[in-house]
């Protein structure tokens, strides 16, 4: 099964295989770089050390990068090793890592999303870190929920570098100009039809494509007390919406919510094709009044000081007949089986997860219990942690693609919300069957 899936991925991603195989590609930065900022071609590895290939997905020029690069140099000086880092969006990073990993030419260490944990483990791409992790003295400073999210069963396969929750970010000055209160429910949102007329800005935003889209959909479904895949008695998973008319009705109501946001002028109709890049940018630059995003936008306070100064944090609006929910995302770093520098990669990963590094680069969104601040980007987000939900621990590639496609079928193709919910249920179960994770009970 693993070989079959590897061959399928290799065929579908053949166009990027050559790029990934040489450890480069279309990145958001000027290319693969050393910690000193020079290109790989102009950087010679220190003769006494090793060169660690590290793939990341920060925003070039933003605070995380600015804080990380001096820390990289500190690690290089301490260890005698050299870091060559490459920057790519998460969408690009996933495909590059799958292709490079299947070809045996992955980087030593890479950022990842929690949605990839089950997939990368099932494909046998990443190192079992259990023994190294248990010997790591600093592991006790991680939240228990964080450690759990790094595991498949009892096996640790990731080292966390960031923990974020989602919240409703609000431009208070814009809301004041619109005479609008912070919406608490979906019904409150739908009453903001004259918001754009008053302010020239749409009140809300959605990410209809890319990695953010299934995360948002997961939250709106959870607010209706729905799971995309439910654990069954045989230890496998199944989407149960079509087995339960009430669940299917609730799922249809979620897709109706998406449709109403467009039809009632609550979100920009162009957002049908937008991902997180556009939606985060639109909020940070003041084009959108409110948006559900993470506390990484704290770093935009320095690059967009004028438009970010009025930001307030609030819970995500939920249905009046539902419950509060938010997405909790613990991002892992993976070490790949093809790496010849696994010990050095683990040392770098734990350095990134150290208190010193976290306080420099991830102080408002650290997975460590001993790193926090009094800022709204930390305390106001952590106040929502009890409502946090995560993806089920299954292979999610086909599942999340179907989730993205289901939103497109409603917003682009005009499929009815009920048909979209039924279609998504079938597609989720088909994906689980393909990965041998579907319960037959």
Image: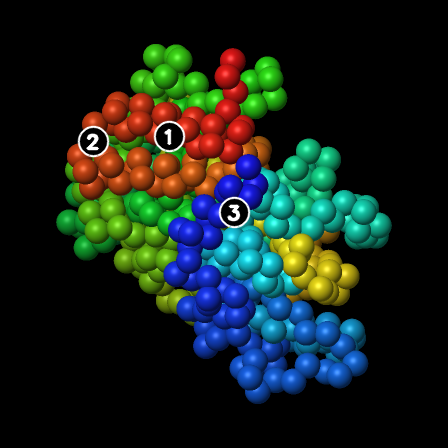
Left or right of 307 on screen, residue 377 = right
> How much space separates mark 1 and mark 2, taking CA atoms?
15 Å
Question: Dots 1 and 2: beta carbons under 8 Å?
Answer: no
Q: Which residue is mark 1?
A: 427
- Residue 239, labelled with which disc? none
Residue 304 in percent (x, y) is at 40, 67
Give the structural element (helix, strand or loop) at label 2: loop
Q: Residue at x 49, y 48 (%)?
A: 7
Q: Residue at x 65, y 63 (%)?
A: 108
Residue lying farthest to the left in this orientation:
197
Q: As rendered, which of 88 and 368 lies closer to the eye?
A: 88
Residue 82: which quarter of the image? Answer: bottom right
Q: Nearer the viewer, mark 3 or mark 2?
A: 3
> How much space separates mark 3 and mark 1, taking CA atoms?
21 Å
Q: As rendered, which of 334 and 434 lies closer to the eye?
A: 434
Left or right of 55 on screen, residue 401 = left
Looking at the image, tell me whether mark 3 or mark 1 is earlier in sequence order.
Answer: 3
Q: As rendered, which of 413 and 256 lies closer to the eye?
A: 413
Q: Which residue is mark 2?
A: 415
Q: Residue at x 57, y 34 (%)?
A: 393
Q: Which residue is mark 3?
A: 6
Tell me if mark 3 has few (under 14), some (14-19) or many (20+) residues whose alpha carbon lies within 10 angstroms of its own: some
Q: As rendered, which of 412 and 357 lies closer to the eye?
A: 412
Say whether residue 188 is visible.
no
Q: How many marks?
A: 3
Q: Nearer the viewer, mark 3 or mark 1?
A: 3
């Amino acid at each position: 099964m693993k070989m079959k899936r590897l061959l399928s991925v290799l065929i579908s991603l053949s166009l990027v295989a050559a790029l990934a195989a040489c450890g480069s590609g279309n990145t958001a930065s000027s290319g693969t770089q050393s910690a000193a900022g020079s290109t790989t071609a102009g950087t010679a590895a220190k003769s006494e050390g090793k060169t660690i290939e590290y793939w990341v997905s920060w925003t070039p020029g933003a605070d995380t990068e600015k804080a990380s690069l001096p820390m990289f140099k500190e690690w290089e000086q301490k260890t005698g090793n050299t870091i060559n880092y490459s920057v790519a969006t998460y969408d690009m990073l996933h495909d590059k890592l799958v292709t490079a990993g299947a070809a045996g030419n992955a980087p030593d260490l890479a950022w990842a999303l929690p949605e990839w944990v089950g997939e990368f483990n099932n494909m046998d791409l990443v190192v079992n870190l259990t023994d190294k992790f248990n010997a790591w003295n600093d592991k006790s400073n991680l939240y228990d929920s964080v450690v759990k999210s790094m595991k498949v069963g009892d096996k640790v396969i990731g080292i966390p570098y960031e923990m974020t929750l989602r919240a409703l970010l609000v431009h208070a000055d814009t809301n004041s100009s619109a005479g609008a209160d912070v919406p608490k429910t979906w019904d409150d949102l739908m009453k903001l039809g004259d918001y754009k007329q008053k302010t020239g800005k749409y009140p809300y935003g959605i990410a209809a494509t890319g990695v953010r889209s299934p995360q948002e959909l997961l939250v709106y479904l959870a607010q209706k007390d729905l799971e995309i895949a439910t654990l069954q008695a045989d230890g496998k998973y199944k989407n149960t919406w079509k087995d339960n008319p009430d669940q299917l009705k609730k799922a249809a109501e979620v897709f109706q919510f998406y449709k109403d946001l467009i039809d009632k002028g609550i979100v920009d109709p162009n957002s049908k094709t937008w991902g997180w890049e556009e939606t985060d940018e639109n909020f940070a630059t003041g084009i959108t009044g409110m948006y559900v995003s993470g506390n990484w936008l704290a770093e935009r306070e320095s690059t967009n000081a004028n438009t970010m100064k009025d930001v307030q944090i609030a819970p995500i609006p939920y249905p009046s007949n539902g419950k509060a929910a938010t997405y909790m995302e613990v991002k892992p770093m993976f070490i790949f089986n093809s790496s010849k520098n696994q010990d050095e990669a683990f040392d770098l990963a734990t350095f990134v997860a150290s208190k010193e590094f976290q306080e420099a680069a991830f102080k408002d969104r650290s997975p460590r219990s001993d790193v926090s601040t009094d800022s709204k980007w930390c305390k106001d987000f952590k106040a929502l942690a009890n409502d946090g939900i995560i993806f089920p621990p299954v292979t999610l590639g086909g599942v999340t693609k179907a989730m993205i496609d289901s939103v497109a079928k409603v917003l682009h193709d005009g499929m009815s919300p009920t048909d979209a919910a039924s279609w998504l249920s079938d597609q989720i179960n088909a994906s689980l069957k393909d990965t041998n994770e579907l319960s037959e009970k």
